[in-house]
Amino acid sequence: MAEPAKPPKDSEYLSTLERGLRVLRAFDSAHPEMPLSEVAQLTKLSPAVARRCLNTLVQLGYVAQYGRKFLLRPEVLSFGTSYLSSMNVDQVVLPPLQRVRDDTGDSSSMAVLSGDDILYVAHVSTNRRIRVGATVGTRFPLHATSLGKVLLAFQDPAIIAAYFDRATLTRFTEHTVTSRDGLEARLQRARTTGYDSALDELDYGLVSVAVPVLDAQRRIVAAINCSTSTTRISQEELVRTRLPLLRDAAAEIGSALQRWPALIHSLHQN
């Protein structure tokens, strides 16, 4: 379970709400249903606290209990759809991504930083099968993706330093960047060139290229990419043919964000 960023606690901070959200976030593809003991273990809550959180979520309709196991109910989808509709993501972000997909046949996505991961907030898929699927709400470790390297590269130096102090650079393939020196070099290259491209880093057979989405003050708010199978195109050809399209799409999204202040405020890290 990915840990969300924890703000400094103060008199207005509700630890009970934090615990309930921690319980909801414990369920994922590896843990679709769990007994109380497993929920407590994953969330690092006592069994008594985990039980109260689960019972409350059951009564609110977000969790169901079958026998000794608990699982999410469809009602939790309302959180995600509320964000997408209230922030007008479909109107602002999807049209440029769809044009990139239509022009290339690649999947195209927009993501933001979320702790040490990237979090997909928009995704336009292709009919082609790829080994690692993604959709809105999907998370991947940032060091293994082109989106993640772009998102980190354009952050303030203090944010980058804090990431390296805490992050574990897990190896997913023999091509995953797992050393600090290697990742720092990729970040510097991304700042210099304005893009990053990843080949077989998250999984074999995947190639992608990503660029930043900047606001009017030239601050990064998100990143967009193209991704496809290595059987379709080489990394060099992907960069050569997709980079201009992505830069145009990023500029269009950045310009459109100025007309939707709630969305741009939401995307900013602070």
Image (tube, rainbow, N blue to C red):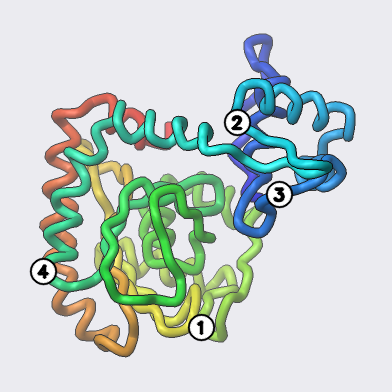
Disc 2 + disc 3, Cβ < 8 Å: no
Q: Residue at x 33, y 35 (%)?
A: 84
Q: Residue at x 30, y 31 (%)?
A: 85
Q: Nearer the viewer, residue 101 or 264?
A: 101
Is 46 left or right of 183, judged from the image as shown?
A: right
Q: Position of residue 44 (x, y in %)?
A: 81, 40
Numbered disc in front, either 2 or 1: 2
Disc 4 to disc 3, how far (Cα)? 41 Å
- Asked which secondary structure carries label 1, the reply is loop
Neighbourhood count class around disc 2 (C-alpha, 10 Å): few under 14, some 14–19, many 20 upward? some
What label sits on residue 62 in the rendered view? Answer: 2
What label sits on residue 103 in the rendered view? Answer: 4
Q: Between disc 2 and disc 1, whose residue precedes?
A: 2
Q: Is residue 174 above or below residue 116?
A: below
Disc 1 + disc 4, Cβ < 8 Å: no
Disc 2 to disc 1, how far (Cα)? 40 Å
Please name the amino acid that badge 2 sits on: Tyr
Disc 4 to disc 2, how far (Cα)? 40 Å
Q: Which residue is mark 1?
A: 175
Q: Position of residue 40 (x, y in %)?
A: 82, 40
> Residue furthest toward the front?
67
What label sits on residue 33 in the rendered view? Answer: 3
Please name the amino acid that badge 1 sits on: His
Q: Position of residue 57 (x, y in %)?
A: 67, 26
Please name the amino acid that badge 4 sits on: Asp
- Asked which secondary structure carries label 3, the reply is strand
Numbered disc in front, either 1 or 4: 4
Disc 1 to disc 4, how far (Cα)? 29 Å
